[in-house]
Image: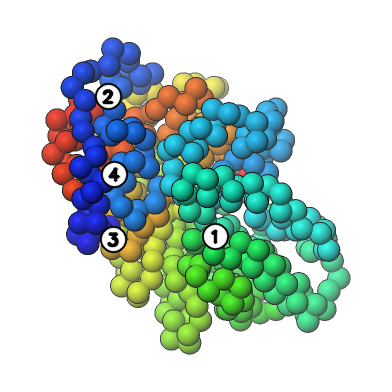
Amino acid sequence: MKASRLAAAAMLATAITLPAALPSAASPSDRPEPPGLAKQDTLRWSTPKDFRIGTAVAGGGHHTSQPYPAPFFNDQQYREVLGSEFSSVSAENQMKWEFIHPERNRYRFAEMDAIVEFAQKHGQVVRGHTLLWHSQNPEWLEEGDFSDQELRTILKDHIMTVVGRYAGQIQQWDVANEIFDSEGNLRTEENIWIRELGPGIVADAFRWAHQADPEAKLFFNDYGVEANNAKSDAYYELIKDYLAKGVPVHGFAVQGHLSIRYGFPAGMEANLQRFDDLGLETAVTEIDVRMDLPNGAEPTAAQLEKQASYYQRALDACLGVEDCNSFTIWGFVDKYSWVPVFFEGQGAATVMWNDYTRKPAYYALQESLVKATPGGEHRWEHHPAYRH
Ligand code: 9MR
């Protein structure tokens, strides 16, 4: 996000005014709840124009083993917050192979159709996730006995069918997800496609996706690549090679599953910048910031502040890079987060409490978005939540 986008956002900025009154209620972290910043005081109305603030849409995956009904279809308050706070939505699980293609000759499109319809009704773009991954593949695929030619046809048909169905309606596709391990080696054993068909299949997946939807921006997506390290280096080299060969790759996305137990990934902006310098778009696609909560402890004010600063630093890194236009949080309310299900004794990773009230992390994001909007810095400095 640089000057060009700031200028484009000028019109939006004029709609934002700072209300005079302080609210009386204290937030659970003892920080004052700031008054509304905007006419519509939500994240999406605080963003510079052309910058998308997104969330994963809860459904499938870990949700199916939880004691609540499918959030997207049943939780009215969830739907209201989803529609009002975000300008981009990602399918948390509903486009993954095991969900959308449960049998060889059967697709399950109903949930994704509903998400796309919701997004259109609310003026949101959609991120598609994902087409080629080592995880969450259906048993018929992983356990099937297919020749190489059959497997290739299965992947191509899947991509043409799924990408083709939503052509023109998906802004960005995570074509290939998590293809490298932490040392920067291709997952040649775990990933069925690379194992059976060789690394060239990844480029083919991009070509087929491009054929099926020439408008969609096609991304690599991974975790642990926020910093400059062996894994992000591996992407850098592979993408350079693809660009030289004319493979249609348009973006590099860092997921952003962070924990305050560790330091904030060093040099995140510079890392995004080197991909931007290759002519790519970049994005933060799945950020959440978890913390240790042993024996069901409540987050402390210090933990919440640290969490807020991680969210904010990640957003600032993205806002600092010209073509980082999309910042997605991996769920916005703790009760539906994947984190406590996968990491025992950890949680509180999202920006809202279970009753949808806002945590310091929410305000930290809002602060950065407002400040990136022309005139916004001035407004935020006079804001009671201003922390610097
Ligand atoms: O949030 C997703 C959860 O519901 C699933 O059960 C889980 C299964 O692996 O996947 C989660 O989403 C992952 C995403 O698709 C890829 N990056 C890591 C995410 C967190 O595991």
N-terminal label among 1 and 3: 1
- Amino acid bearing label 4: Leu
State the CA–CA distance, disc 4 to disc 3. 14 Å
Q: Residue 116, image x and y in percent? A: 58, 51
Residue bearing the label numbered 4? 369
State the CA–CA distance, disc 1 to disc 3. 25 Å
- Amino acid bearing label 2: Pro
State the CA–CA distance, disc 2 to disc 4. 16 Å
Name which residue lies at 76% across and 72% down.
154
Instruction: State the residue in front, 302 or 353.
Output: 353
Residue bearing the label numbered 2? 35
Instruction: State the residue in front, 32 or 41.
Output: 41
Name which residue lies at 44% across and 71% down.
250
- Amino acid bearing label 3: Val
Residue bearing the label numbered 1? 169
Q: Residue 103, image x and y in percent? A: 82, 58
Q: Residue 140, image x and y in percent? A: 83, 61
N-terminal label among 2 and 1: 2
N-terminal label among 3 and 2: 2
Q: What element carries label 4?
A: helix
